[in-house]
Amino acid sequence: MAALSQLAQRRVGDVTIIALSGRCDEGDLAIRDGIDRLVLDGVVKVVLDLHAIDYLDSTGLGMLAAKYLTLRRQGGDLKLLSVPKQSLQLLTVTKLITVFERFESEEEAVASFSKPSRS
């Protein structure tokens, strides 16, 4: 079984939306490498759309937290869109729910980059 079945990327203004589907776990290098390439290109405003994620484990979540730090160090941010219930439970248990900003609508997620950043 593939670690991540699909990663689709598009731009809305200066924000990049990355839609994930499938599994996000220890074998997933696509999202890590994708965000690293964006940072190299100067793109630091990223929204991850997780609505089609079937599975997220602690190593996948750890990788997302590491990419969050990468983007923050470059003056950007990583925000989550449409987090599935199972993934939300993992965010709660790991206390990372207090780190990531989460949104249910893409419009709100994109607009949040225009507001002052929370520290």
Image (cartoon, grey):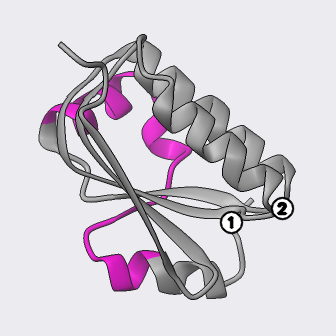
Q: Is residue 119 magenta?
A: no
Give the class, few, some or many, for how many residues have Cα within 10 Å of label 2's Cα (few <14, many ≥20).
few
Q: Is residue 17 above or below residue 114?
A: above
Mark 1: amino acid: Arg
Which residue in the protein does label 1 denote? Answer: 118
Q: Main secondary structure of the magenta part?
A: helix
Residue in front for this viewpoint, 87 or 94: 87
Q: Is residue 94 left or right of residue 57?
A: right
- Residue sitting at 78 percent across and 59 percent down? 41
Q: In the rendered image, which residue does mark 2 sit on? A: 75
The residue range painted magenta reads 86-109
> In this view of the protein, which residue sits in the foreground, 71 or 28?
28
Kind of residue sitting beneath label 2: Gly
Residue found at x 34% / y 32%: 92
Asked whether residue 89 is drawn in magenta, I would say yes
Q: Is residue 42 left or right of residue 20?
A: right
In the rendered view, would you say 107 is above or below 92? below
Instruction: In the rendered structure, find residue 1 and report the number of the disc placed on it.
Output: none
